[in-house]
Amino acid sequence: MNFQPLGKRVLVQRLEEATKTASGIIIPDNAKEKPSQGTVVAVSTEVENVSTGDTVVFGKYAGNELTLDGKAYLVIETDDLLGIIK
């Protein structure tokens, strides 16, 4: 994959949502919500506070979906990022 975000944007791959609850109940695919956490894969040259490999939290409807090499990613502006999980 060779993708460089422009402006103040980052490329994020969503973290996988759990398929079971803590009590062992299996959650069907149609009942799952998209996770609001992901790992930063690529960063624009204009971004200062976020780096590749950071786990970030973003809004439910943030970013634009993009498919590269058969994998789903989000291109998110840094203003839409809520925080970094350390």
Image (tube, rainbow, N blue to C red):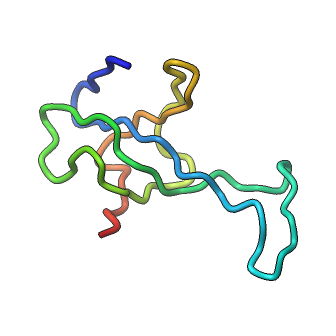
Q: How many numbered marks are there?
A: 0
> x, y percentage for residue 24?
83, 76
Q: Residue at x 45, y 51 (%)?
A: 38
- Which residue occupies the foreground of this view, 61 or 18? 18
Q: Which quadrant of the view contains residue 56?
A: bottom left
Q: Residue at x 29, y 36 (%)?
A: 9
In front: 55, or 63? 55
Apparent side of residue 55 relative to residue 33 in the rendered image (left or right): left
Is residue 39 placed above or below 75 in the rendered structure?
A: below
- Outermost residue, bottom side: 23
Q: Position of residue 6 (x, y in %)?
A: 24, 24
In the rendered image, the vertical position of residue 36 relative to residue 63, given as above or below: below
On the rendered image, what quadrant is the C terminus found in? Answer: bottom left
Q: Residue furthest front?
A: 24
Q: Taking 70 as reference, is 39 above or below it?
A: below
For the point 27% across and 23% down, the residue is: 4
The quarter holding residue 43 reads top left
Indicate left or right for 24 with 5 as reference.
right
Residue for point 25% across, 44% down = 52
On-image quarter of the N terminus = top left
Q: Position of residue 25 (x, y in %)?
A: 87, 72
The location of residue 82, given as percent across then percent down, is 37, 61
